[in-house]
Amino acid sequence: MGFKNFLLKQALKMKMKDVPEAERDMMLTLVEKNPEFFKKIGDEVKRRMKNGESEMAATMVVMRENQAELQKLMGR
């Protein structure tokens, strides 16, 4: 899993270049805890983008819809 984590970390750095490193590390930890959940989120964002929504709008809606699960993963 080391190489896969490396690639994931690099992708997160590119996507979240303006986000502090501590927050990027937190996101990586969350993704490692439940990769299927984040794949589902990514797939839903892509589906919404194909239907004409911007990436930001689609992400915001999907994250809001999954807020409870995200809070569980974050331990809140």
Image (cartoon, rainbow, N blue to C red):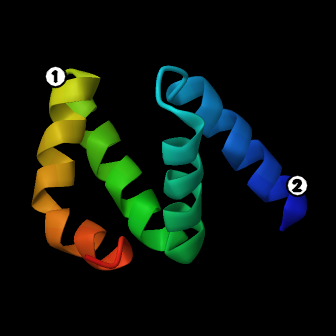
Q: CA distance from mark 2 to mark 1?
A: 34 Å
Instruction: Give coordinates of residue 47: x percent, y percent.
Output: 27, 42
Viewer-side residue, 1 vs 17: 17
Crowdedness near tag 2: few (<14), some (14–19) or many (≥20) residues, C-alpha within 10 Å: few
Q: Residue at x 19, y 35 (%)?
A: 58
Secondary structure at badge 2 equals helix
Instruction: Give coordinates of residue 64: x percent, y percent.
Output: 12, 53
- Position of 41 with respect to 67 (left or right) is right
Q: Residue at x 50, y 29 (%)?
A: 16
Q: Residue at x 33, y 79 (%)?
A: 75
Label 1 sits on what residue type? Answer: Gly
Secondary structure at badge 1 equals loop
Instruction: Give coordinates of residue 74: x percent, y percent.
Output: 36, 71
Vertically, is 30 above or below 5? Answer: below
Crowdedness near tag 1: few (<14), some (14–19) or many (≥20) residues, C-alpha within 10 Å: few
Viewer-side residue, 8 vs 46: 8
Vertically, is 66 above or below 25? Answer: below
Q: Which residue is mark 1?
A: 52
Question: Which numbered marker is on residue 3?
Answer: 2
Instruction: Please state, as top left, top right, bottom left or bottom right, where the C terminus lies in the image.
Output: bottom left
Instruction: Give coordinates of residue 33: x percent, y percent.
Output: 54, 75
Q: Quadrant of residue 50?
A: top left
Q: Quadrant of residue 71?
A: bottom left
- Position of 42 with respect to 26 (left or right) is left
Instruction: Please state, as top left, top right, bottom left or bottom right, where the N terminus lies in the image.
Output: bottom right
Of labels 2 and 1, the one closer to you: 2
